[in-house]
Amino acid sequence: MATSATSDQLLVIIDPAARQGDGESVRIAKDVLSAGAAAKVCLPDSPEEFARALGRRGSRRPVVIGDDAALVRAVGLLHRHRELADCALSVVPVGPASLAGALGVPLGAVAAARAVLEGGERRLDLLVDDSDGVVLGCLGIPPTSVRALTPEPVGAPSHHHPWLRSTYRTLVRTLGSRPARLRVDLDGETVTDLDRPVEAVSVTPSGHGVASVEIHPFAFADSAASVVTSARTITVTGEDFHYRADAVTSGPVRRRTWRVAEGAWGLVVPRG
């Protein structure tokens, strides 16, 4: 449930990629926000300036105008400074913003800006790893296999024929991925070990302090079924694996643990 945002004073941080990619949407969003609240506008030119602007917000409510990467950057900075609990973050999506849309933020500049002014705070879960990184949406291992799983490319079979879509995705996975030797422990229990190669592992916060976990065995390894379950702590061990957290690919690492932080951050979304 969304609760009231706490401050009528805004710190509007405009990501440089948004200014360069769609200046008109940025101008519209800035005009709507400035007309509805006392807004201080910052135009950082680097990640360091972005971080300084966010850190000096004082009592102003931060608003990020930018894409999914800018949103994840802001949440990561607030998390590392242990300021997420007391901060309601807003975003006006400009640029690639499938994550923001999935979290309930309107994708149009005017609608998103109005949601900043009139919306409420919704507390959301996130994944925190053992290097203090955060994941707001989907974690995928290995990153190429997860991209082959979703989203569906143009020309894929229609959603009106689920069995065709399933066959299509199976074909994409078979042709486009290689096996990974990974051990996956969920809440301390080993679900799959190094002797059973996997094609992909995906983890997504699903609310109520747990994450949805899917483990897909490699197509040619054996007849084992995919694992679809939930967990609060996920540990993956393997030889030099990469992973994709939201829009960023990281690694290689040999071991990484993610835990679900329940209600760890607040996002302003439209009421209702």
Image: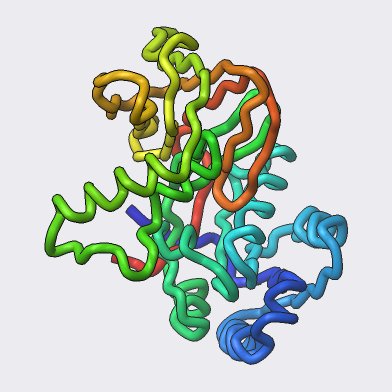
Q: Residue at x 77, y 73 (%)?
A: 16
Query: Is 138 on the left or on the right of 191, as rendered?
Result: right
- Count the marks: how many? 0
Residue 100 in view (yes/no): yes
Which x, y percent locates residue 157? 23, 63
Query: Is 82 on the left or on the right of 52, as rendered?
Result: left
**58 above or below 180?**
below
Residue 35 in view (yes/no): no
Asked which quadrant contains residue 170, the reply is: top left
Which x, y percent locates residue 124? 44, 45
Q: Which residue occupies the foreground of this view, 244 or 25? A: 244
Q: Residue at x 47, y 22 (%)?
A: 234
Q: Residue at x 51, y 72 (%)?
A: 116
Which x, y percent locates residue 5? 50, 62
Asked which quadrant contains residue 131, the reply is: top right
Q: Residue at x 83, y 69 (%)?
A: 44
**248 above or below 160?**
above
Q: Which residue occupies the foreground of this view, 190 or 266? A: 190
Which x, y percent locates residue 92? 56, 72
**124 above or below 42?**
above
**89 above or below 167?**
below
| Image quadrant in which the C terminus is located | bottom left
Q: Which residue occupies the foreground of this view, 174 or 235? A: 174
- The colour scheme of the drawn protein is rainbow
